[in-house]
Image (spheres, grey):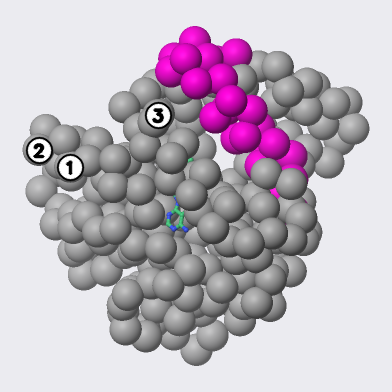
């Protein structure tokens, strides 16, 4: 099994990325949503809406939000669809603590939302448990991405949908150059402003630059067993939503 350093994409022991990511998201959990909102110039809300619209969810659907963090995707799904249940899972307990405060404030709008600490590379649910699996800005942080994708495929019911929102590569060269400059200087500056942890955000920017582009990630989804793999670029390809179905 090949694991990588998620900051560079080069082969490395899984613990390197796992420990770093847990420490970063523990440190920034309380400021994470504010950072996301300002650093994306408010686009985060639009992208979440688009992600929620890209999945078919009914009142009986069971949904798994992987690397769900503070619950941004989960609560958007509660607002737009009202499924029967959402399991909001994440590797970092501090992120889920923020999600629990949001549940206490009623952001789940009456939907049953269960939180649990889960490593996406080893999902503790039976095969074919969920109708929909979502993940936003999570897969980039995982050292064995193929294993996580196979796990997501395994827990989906046959024909179930996965929807993954992730930063990506603008195909148009001038947009790519602008975006790379923003990653280099803008993201660490915003991170420093909100949390005082500039280095954590240098990592986030590095991990975005090292992440496979749209076509490569689509190929990874097919290799993990998914079919009907599609993607939709957002903001000139700075971010992208991939959708696919589990084999019937
Ligand atoms: C950038 S945040 C995204 C949170 C949320 N999905 C959102 O849209 O705001 C990335 C999340 O991935 C989680 N994560 C990192 N590695 C993980 C793993 N191996 N399994 C599950 N979650 C992981 C982190 O704890 C963090 O909460």
Secondary structure beneath label 2? helix
Between 164 and 24, the one nearer to me in the picture: 24
The mark lying in front, picked from 1 and 3, is 3
Q: Secondary structure at mark 3?
A: helix
Which quadrant of the figure contains the N terminus? bottom right
Q: Given the current orientation, which residue lies at the most extreme top position? A: 193
Q: In the visual, does 241 lie left or right of 110?
A: right
Predominant secondary structure, magenta span: helix
Magenta stretch containing residue 186, yes or no? no
| Image coordinates for residue 232, horizontal then vertical, percent | 65, 50
Q: Residue at x 58, y 61 (%)?
A: 14
Q: Which residue is mark 3?
A: 28
Q: Residues within 10 Å of mark 3 (few under 14, many from 20)?
A: many
Which range is magenta? 189-212
**172, 166: nearer the viewer:** 166
- Residue 87 falls in image quadrant: bottom left
Residue that mark 1 sits on: 100
Upstream in the sequence, badge 1 or badge 3? Answer: 3
- Decide if residue 229 is in sight here: no
Disc number at residue 104? Answer: 2
């Amino acid at each position: 099994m090949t694991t990588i350093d998620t900051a560079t994409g080069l082969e490395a022991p899984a613990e390197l990325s796992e420990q770093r990511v847990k420490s970063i998201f523990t440190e920034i959990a309380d400021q994470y949503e504010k950072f996301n909102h300002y650093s994306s110039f408010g686009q985060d809300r639009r992208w979440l809406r688009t992600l929620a619209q890209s999945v078919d969810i009914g009142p009986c659907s069971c949904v798994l939000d992987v690397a769900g963090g503070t619950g941004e995707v989960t609560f958007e799904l509660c607002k737009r669809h009202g499924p029967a249940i959402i399991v909001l899972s994440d590797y970092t307990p501090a992120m889920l603590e923020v999600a629990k405060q949001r549940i206490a404030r009623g952001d789940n709008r009456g939907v049953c939302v269960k939180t649990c600490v889960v490593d996406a590379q080893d999902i503790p649910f039976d095969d074919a448990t969920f109708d929909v699996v979502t993940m936003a800005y999570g897969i980039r942080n995982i050292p064995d991405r193929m294993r996580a994708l196979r796990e997501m495929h395994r827990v989906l019911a046959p024909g179930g949908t996965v929807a993954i929102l992730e930063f990506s590569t603008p195909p148009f060269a001038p947009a790519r150059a602008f975006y790379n400059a923003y990653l280099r200087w803008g993201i660490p500056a915003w991170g420093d402003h909100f949390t005082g942890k500039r280095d954590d955000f240098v990592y986030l920017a590095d991990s975005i630059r090292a992440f496979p582009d749209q076509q490569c990630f689509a190929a990874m989804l097919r290799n993990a067993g998914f079919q009907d793999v599609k993607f939709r670029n957002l903001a000139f390809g700075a971010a992208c939503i991939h959708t696919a179905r589990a084999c019937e």
